[in-house]
Image: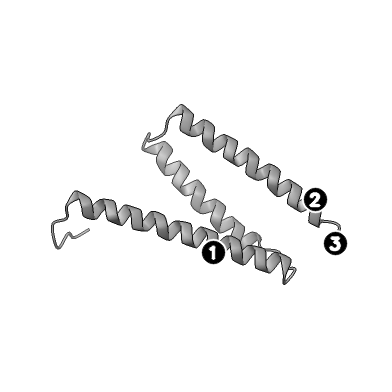
Amino acid sequence: MINVAPRDEREALVDLAADRLAFLVLAFGLLLAVMYRSFVLDEASWDLIGLIVLAGAAGFVYRLQARATSGRWLALRFVTVVVAAAIAAVIVLAFSGR
């Protein structure tokens, strides 16, 4: 990559924060699109859910490879995945009878 102008730490931190915000907007926007397609249009949205899961998995793998994780961080992620799966199961069971 060609670096045209020298950058300081603040610019790099702002770039990281902007990317983090952009990912959150994209992920929650996709989740809203999935909800709309599922509840209003009664369509399956596995493609969009797959994008969200794939993006999260890519970040997870990158952090693992960079060894930027701790035991507490991994435990919190594990609990988050288990709770999300439980909520998803309840939603699927609640709306499977339509």
According to the picture, the residue beneath numbered tag 2 turns out to be 93
Residue 72: image x %, image y %?
A: 47, 29
Amino acid type, mark 1: Gly
**Extreme right residue here?**
97
**Extreme bottom residue here?**
41
Residue 81: image x %, image y %?
A: 60, 41
The disc, 3 or 1, on the residue closer to the chain's N-terminal end is 1
Label 1 neighbourhood size at 10 Å, few (<14), some (14-19), many (20+)?
few
Tell me the quarter of the picture where residue 69 sits: top left
Amino acid type, mark 3: Arg
The image's colouring method is: one colour
Tell me the quarter of the picture where residue 80 sits: top right
Q: Residue at x 72, y 72 (%)?
A: 41
Q: Residue at x 69, y 46 (%)?
A: 87
Q: Residue at x 75, y 47 (%)?
A: 90
Label 2 neighbourhood size at 10 Å, few (<14), some (14-19), many (20+)?
few
Q: CA distance from mark 3 to mark 1?
A: 26 Å
Q: CA distance from mark 1 to mark 2?
A: 24 Å
Tell me the quarter of the picture where residue 66 sits: top left
According to the picture, the residue beneath numbered tag 3 turns out to be 98
Number of the label disc, if any, that sits on residue 71: none
Relative vertical location of residue 38 with respect to residue 61 in this rendering, above or below: below
Q: Quadrant of the C terminus?
A: bottom right
Amino acid type, mark 2: Leu
The disc, 2 or 3, on the residue closer to the chain's N-terminal end is 2
Q: Secondary structure at mark 2?
A: helix
According to the picture, the residue beneath numbered tag 1 turns out to be 29
Relative depth, front residue between 58 and 92: 92
Circles 3 and 1 in contact, beta carbons < 8 Å: no
